[in-house]
Image (cartoon, helix red, strand yellow):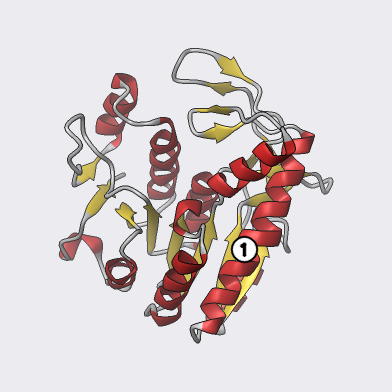
Amino acid sequence: MTLTLLKLGGELLENDQKLAGMGRMVARAAGPLAIVHGGGREIDAALAELGIPKRQVDGLRVTDARTLDVVVSVLAGTVNTRFVAAINAAGGRAVGLTGADAGVAPVKKAPPHHATSGAVVDLGLVGEPARAAAPALVTMLVARGFVPVIACIGAAKNGQLFNVNADTLAGSLAARLGATRLVVAGGTPGVLDEEGLTIPALGPRDIRALVKSGTASAGMVAKLTACQAAARGGVKDVAIVDGRDTKTLGAFVGRRALDRTPFAGTRITP
């Protein structure tokens, strides 16, 4: 089955106008589609309201128990529900999920993170995807014409919830599902070089050079790592694109092959 896994940055879903536009895009998208979304800015705002300090390393959120409670509340209780409602209001058939549902995203505690700065950091209650078969629930929903919309929360075997980086979850899930395409959409027109111009394609050696030079931002490092994992996992077409223009994004998601059609963004090659 041809499937596109679309990862949407939380900045694309943070107000009613953006939700409505993205909801229309998803409702009109051609072909089987599953979505993973973040919600970083809304999590930051909720943490600030509660006086809980924010800490990130290379785009990964260091998560203690209080932060995890906020992450779960915002992602599953606010962003996911509002987005699902927007898609369905536009005529779509969206179903809201988290990675904790029926083996959608089994995880284990992430090991200490070796940061680009050279520091070794314990990320706390942050999960990394565990090896698992394709999630039957997502496969079934997609086969029946539904659009699974997945918040980036995972669960370990003992039921412990973990915060999971949305890009990391998307890359892993795309490979597990045997997706044809992974599209990572955010608020920038792909991966940018030192002059702010979009780089059309990147291979592993190029990515290592970008990270080492510091040209790739902390958040982009996480995206690039996730995209590489998906490409190594057999996902044929992997790209980082600008998600702010929903019309262009919708057309892009529906394309049959990235290598046959010009597009605005960065293609990641294995």
Tell me: 41 left or right of 69.
Answer: left
Tell me: 199 left or right of 138.
Answer: left
Task: Tell me the element at label 1.
Answer: helix
| Whole-percent x, y for residue 158 in the image | 84, 45
Which residue is the extreme one toward the front? 49
Which residue is the extreme one toward the right? 158
| Whole-percent x, y for residue 123 in the image | 65, 28
| Whole-percent x, y for residue 216 in the image | 33, 31
In the rendered image, which quarter is residue 224 located in?
A: top left
Q: Residues within 10 Å of mark 1 (few under 14, many from 20)?
A: many
Please tell me which residue is depicted at 17% across the width and 65% down the height of the picture. 261
Say which quadrant the N terminus sits in.
bottom left
Amino acid type, callout 1: Asn
Q: Could one spot residue 245 in this view of the protein? A: yes
Q: Is residue 207 above or below residue 10?
A: above
In the rendered image, which quarter is residue 128 located in?
A: top right
| Whole-percent x, y for residue 32 in the image | 45, 76
Please tell me which residue is depicted at 21% across the width and 34% down the height of the picture. 193
Please tell me which residue is depicted at 71% across the width and 43% down the height of the picture. 162
Q: Could one spot residue 98 in this view of the protein? A: no
